[in-house]
Amino acid sequence: MQITNLEEYAKTYRESVENPEEFWAKVASQFTWREKWEKVLDYNFSDYYSKWFINGKLNITENCLDRHLETKKDKEAIIWVANDPNEEDRRITYGELHQKVCEFAGVLKNHNVEKGDRICLYMPMVPELVIAVLACARIGAIHSVVFAGFSSNALASRIQDANAKVIITADGAFRGNKIIPLKAWVNDALDSCPGVESCIVLKRTQEEAEMKEGRDYWWEDEIKNAKPLFDAEVMDSEDPLFILYTSGSTGKPKGVLHSCGGYMVYTWYSFLNVFQYQEKDIYWCTADIGWITGHSYIVYGPLLAGATSVMFEGVPTYPDAGRFWKIVDRLGVNIFYTAPTAIRALMAKGLEYVNLYQLDSLKVLGTVGEPINSEAWHWYHTHIGKDRCPIVDTWWQTETGGIMISPLAGITPTKPTYATLPLPGIQPALVDNKGNEIQGNSVEGNLSIKFPWPSMIRTTYGDHERCKNTYFSTFKGYYFTGDGCKRDEEGYYRILGRVDDVINVSGHRLGTAEVENAINLHSSVIESAVVGYPHEIKGQGIYAFVICDLHKLENTSFEEVKKEIRDKVSEVIGAIAKPDKIQIVKGLPKTRSGKIMRRILRKIAEGDTTNLGDISTLLDPSIVESIKEGRISN
Ligand code: WTA
């Protein structure tokens, strides 16, 4: 199933478009199914549904684990590297991982978890997170991993939305030189989540953690009290596998739901082809499992392929900016997949942290999560890849489940800042603002997908209307991605960034409305407007324009109130959403109908104030002058 040259790519692509069902049936037949599907695909984009491998029965963990036991029992599935460079690695073979997943499945059963129940995971990057994810999938429970950098408020709203029955966490998490008191945050969240019956707590940092009798249990004790459960639940291909919350242009994050069969087929196929994975490769994706990249390309894709997946608990700059490269050399990493923001952060620290290392095991480099600027691309290519490793710039989304547009490593000729060409089975289209497909090359438009693929979003949890409205109503007959995109003279795709009110901060998606809602909870704030602006390291930074009630501020300085606003955002969402710049303003540029003209604010935040366009439709055009004057430039 691995494409080996450009001609074969072109041929496979053509076949996949001409006869998608036949193509995907061939891919799907590589797996262990308890019962074969009856029909490959049924879908409708106008009243959205998409069903794959209909009536097929399987368990994804049998494909990630059991299937490999015969030939790869002693092969390492996970090599875990701790935050502290002096702590020993943990190496877990396929045989051991299988055993541990079945043990933890037994624990979940003891806590009355049934097929279809939602389980929330709020954990550090430790192997037990992978074990818990797979144990859920083993028994048919729907996992919802919440990134451990989200605040207790954000966690609580995700638990409530999914109505999770069990939460799995740890006493704390190590991140660089910080310790995050996860259990304390969970305790705060659970005060407003009465539906949670059990909380299972892994010991990691030895933090003091208050345990509530009858609700909270130590992971280690529970394992001792449980019998391993070896039988996997037989799942329908379309049964839900997981929920992952992501931000959109409205205030409330939505639970993107993926199902078992299609997700399995696509994550495996894309992993194999994009990275050109070979049997002996050591593969390392630096993402956190709290995001889709970690789900698809630390856990499911690599394990489905029987690969050795490196998992790193720490951060790129701790104890110094050479940490990634030190690990690459020490483990002999062959395939390395990271985010542009990490590359830019390390680039800024200087080459002395790179030049200490050989990096000669590397064969393939990857990036994901945001557009990569040319300078970062070249630095990565020259100094990390030594001009020898192809870079796969992989474009995709939480909703797409897997990589959609990307070079196949070493096969597709790369071009800096271009995600290049669609994977087989993926049919992108550029659509103009009226919803007409733009044909030909050297064009720009709204990136949309005109035909289903196996790992596409099935619904937004508990609110299918929202799924239809968000993705299938903007352009009739298309899945709309929210990204702007260019197709150049040779048909290569270049992602230009979001065209909606979503900002991408260090590769993390945040809705401007979500940040505004948090800012507005500060008692002195009357109104706010948030926009993104180019940020050297983060890709985009958050610029907040805030109107305050000056009477309430009498005894507080602007600096103090800005700090309070940042703390408020941290409390409501998490530190990742803290505004980089806060400008206190007298008013916002509003139209007569009360709509904020964000276009103007974006320009001001970017520092491009010479041509603000037509401002005559504003209720009070003079407000623009005063905002311009107060602009925060650095
Ligand atoms: C952006 C991450 C440019 C894009 C897997 C998309 C990218 C959003 C790239 C999804 C890329 C992702 N080049 N932009 N290679 N990859 N994006 O859901 O705006 O966290 O819509 O999924 O990230 O972010 P998400």
Image: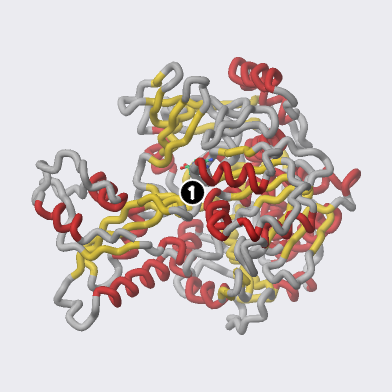
Classify residue 27 as left or right of residue 216: right
Q: Is residue 135 visible?
A: no
- Point 57% across, 50% down: residue: 339
Q: Is residue 40 above or below residue 465?
A: above
Residue 253, x across and y down, in percent = 43, 53
Q: Quadrant of the C terminus?
A: bottom left
Q: Is mark 1 within 8 Å of ligand 1?
A: no
- Res. 558 image quadrant: bottom left
Vertical order, 557 against 484 (above or below): below
Quadrant placement of the N terminus? top right
The residue at 38%/67% (across/down) is 569
Quarter of the image where one finds residue 144? bottom right
Mark 1 = which residue? 461
Kindly state the secondary structure of the residue where label 1 is placed. Answer: loop
* Residue 627 picture location, percent across and down: 19, 57
Confirm whether residue 475 shows in the render.
yes
Question: Is 91 in front, or is 581?
Answer: 581
**Residue ID at (43%, 21%):** 442
Between 375 and 630, the residue placed more toward the observer is 375
Name which residue type carries label 1.
Tyr
Quarter of the rendering containing residue 174: bottom right
